[in-house]
Amino acid sequence: MPLPRKIMTPGGLVIQGYQIPQKVRLNNMIESFESNNRKTTVFALNHVVHHNPSTWGKDHDQFIPDRFLGPNSKDLQGYLSPFSTGHRMCIGKNLAMMNILKVLSTVLRNYKLEMVHPEEPVDTLSVGISEKKGGLLCRISRR
């Protein structure tokens, strides 16, 4: 997420005595860089990033998982950081991921998933374990 260019001059910006260069590459909303032999960290709060209408649209405060299936889904993934990153990341991330795995394995153990149209060819976006092009209609029944 680039710094707003409206307030940036070609030489950058000084905030409380720290020089912020105009071009800062942010990776998962956190980037450290060297400037005048000082290390400065630029950090965007998750809540602000996850509720930015210019990124997510007018429905930024609604749970719409389909927004990650559209043509700009790869761009949106760069703005999504549900557990944060670095040494201050959510301490419950591993517990949450384990619970998601348990729910998924329980569903797969107790339910049978079948393709509605198994005769249709399955085209993927890349080789290996991949995302399927288009939707995949499934029939779910109890085992």
Image (tube, helix red, strand yellow):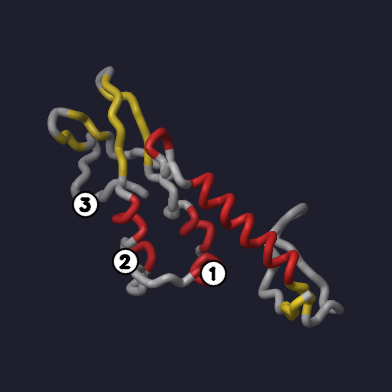
For the point 19% across and 48% down, which residue is it? 7
Q: CA distance from mark 1 to mark 3?
A: 29 Å
Q: Residues within 10 Å of mark 1 (few under 14, many from 20)?
A: few
Question: What secondary structure is found at the residue carrying circle 2?
Answer: helix
* Residue 116 image offset from top left, x and y in percent: 78, 82
Q: Is residue 108 above or below residue 33?
A: below
Q: Which residue is mark 1?
A: 70
Earlier residue among tags 1 and 3: 3
Q: Is residue 89 above or below residue 101?
A: above
Q: Amino acid at mark 3?
A: Lys
Left or right of 61, for residue 17:
left
- 102 or 59: which is nearer to us? 102
Task: Classify residue 16 by image quadrant.
Answer: top left
Q: Is residue 110 above or below residue 20?
A: below
Whether the residues at callouts 2 and 1 have beta carbons within 8 Å, the answer is no
Left or right of 14, for residue 109:
right
Q: From this viewpoint, which residue is outermost toward the top? A: 37
Q: Which residue is mark 2?
A: 53
Q: Amino acid at mark 1?
A: Gly
Q: Amino acid at mark 2?
A: Pro
Marker disc for residue 46:
none
Question: What secondary structure is found at the residue carrying circle 1?
Answer: loop
Marker disc for residue 6:
3
Task: Classify residue 25 by image quadrant.
Answer: top left
